[in-house]
Image: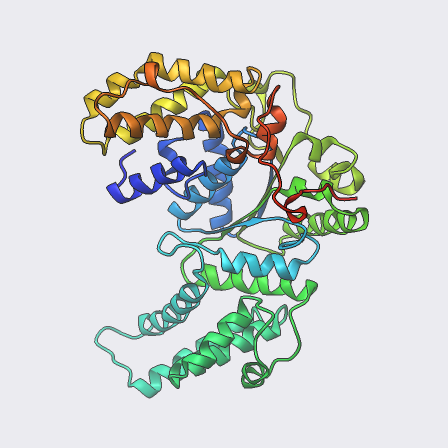
Amino acid sequence: MSISEQRRREVIDALRRGTVPSHSLDALAVGLARFEAATDEALDRASAGQAGFKAVRGEYGAGKTFFTRWLAQRARARGLASAEIQISENETPLHHLQTVYRRLTEHLATAEFAAGALRQVIDSWFFALEQDVLAEQPPGGELAEAELAARVEQLLEQRLARISPVAPSFSAALRAYRAAVARDDPGLAEGLIAWIGGQPTVGASVKRAAGIRGQLDHNGALGFLQGLLTVLRDSGHGGLVVVLDEVETLQRVRGDIRDKALNALRQLIDDVDAGRFPGLVLVITGTAAFFDGPQGVQRLPPLAQRLHVDFMADPVYDNPRAVQIRLPGFSHESLIELGGKVRGLYLAGCADPGRVLAGADDDYLDALAKSAEGQFGGRAGVAPRIYVKKLVDVLDRIDQHPGFDPRRDYVVRMSAQELTDAERAAMPHPPPLAPASSPDDIDLPPP
C-alpha cells in the first residue's frame, strides 16, 4: 500500500504514542484478510439501502479498535460516512441515545472530511438538490436565479417530506438553516447546525427562528438518525458505519443503568432488523466476558439470543458473516509480522534505510517480540501495543544515532505510567505506580 509522506508520519507518530492510527490501516493490517469479503458485502448492502449489525469480540490486545477503524476506513473508501463513539458511563452513557447521537455527529467523518463533517454533509446535500434541479433542464436551457431558488425550494420540500413524519424538528431546522445561509446569517446557521447535531445548549432565539421547542430526547434521537441517513444518501454518501467502542464498560456501572443500556442496545438492534435505518451499519465491540458473563449481554436474555453465535474450538472455521465475530488475537508470529510492517513503513522515510534495517533486522524483531511477551508472562496477545511502541523507539534511536546498537544498548523496560490497566493486570510482576502526592490522586474502585 502506497501512502503519502504526511500520512506515513501521522501513522508513525500515532504508533510512537502507543495509539491506533486513524487512517492508512491497510499498511499495518495483520490477520484481517479473512474478514474482507464479508465486510465488503455488508458495506455494499448498506450502499444499496439495507442495514446491518455486527458485534466484534476480542480480549484486550486482540485489535478490536484497529479492526473497527479498518472497517470504517474501508467504508469511507466506498463513499460511506463513519463515526466512532467511545461508550462511557459519564461522557456517553449508552442508555442516553440523545448523547450517543450527539457524539455521532461530533465524530462524523467522510472520505473528504475528518471528524466533525456534519455541516459539510448538509451543505453538500443542498448543493446536490440544486444540481438535481439543473439536471432536469433541457440542453442549453437556463434558469433565472429566482426561478432556480424556487425550484430548489420545491425539491427541498419533497425530500423533507420523507423526514418530517419521523423527525419534524430535524426537517424544520434544515429548512431554517437554508434560509439563514441565503440571508447570510452565520450565527443563526451555526446555531441550527448545532441543533441538528443534537447539542443541548442551543439558544432559544435559534429555536424560535426554526419554530422548534424543547430538547432532543431519547426517542427524538432515533428520528434524527433517520433524518441524517436520508441526508447522507441524498448527498452521495451510500450509508453510515457507526462504531460503539468499549461497550464492555457497561459491566462496571450500576445495575439499573446497565439494564437500561442493554435494553437500549436491544432496541437499536431491533430497529436495524426492522429496516428503520436504511444504510446504517451498527458495530459494537466487547470482550468475551461482556458477551458471555453474567454482568453483560447475558443479563438481558432477548439481547443474548440476538447475539448468540456457536463458536467452534478452532477459530479457523469461524463464520465472518455471523452477527458476532471474534478476533483471535496476536501470536508470536503475527507480532513479528506486524513489526515487519511497521519497520517497512518507517524505512520509507528515514535518512539511511540500510543502516536502520541492519540494526533492526528480522532476528531483532523476533528478539524484541520475545522480550515484550516475556514482560506479560509470555502472552503475545497482550503485547502488540507496547511492542510496536518500543519498536518505533528503537527505530528512532538507530535513525538518529549511527553508533546505536539495540542489541547492546537497549533494554526493554516498562513503567507503570506507560501501561494501561489491562496491561498491568496481565504482568506477573507489574511495576509499581508512582506514589500518590495527595488523597485526590488515589484511584479507588467504585462501591
Residue at 58% across, 16% down: 377
Is residue 322 visible in the rendered image? The answer is no
Q: Quadrant of the C terminus?
A: top right
Is residue 45 shown above or below 401? below
Q: Position of residue 168 (x, y in %)?
A: 61, 74
Is residue 357 shown above or below 174? above
Q: For this view, does 188 lie left or right of residue 364?
A: right
Q: Where is residue 25 in the image (x, y as percent from the top left)?
A: 39, 37
Give the camera-side residue of 237 and 352: 352
Give the camera-side residue of 269 and 47: 269
The image quarter containing residue 131 is: bottom left
Q: Where is residue 389 in the image (x, y as percent from the top left)?
A: 42, 30
Is residue 76 visible in the rendered image? The answer is yes
How many numbered dots are placed on residues in this image? 0
Q: Where is residue 37 in the image (x, y as percent from the top left)?
A: 46, 32
Of all residues, the one furthest to the front in this rendering is 437
Coloring scheme used: rainbow
Q: For this view, does 263 lie left or right of residue 33?
A: right
Is residue 17 shown above or below 228? above
Residue at 51% across, 22% down: 330
Residue at 53% across, 32% down: 419
Give the camera-side residue of 231 and 16: 16
Residue at 51% across, 40% down: 68
Q: In which quarter of the image is the N terminus?
A: top left
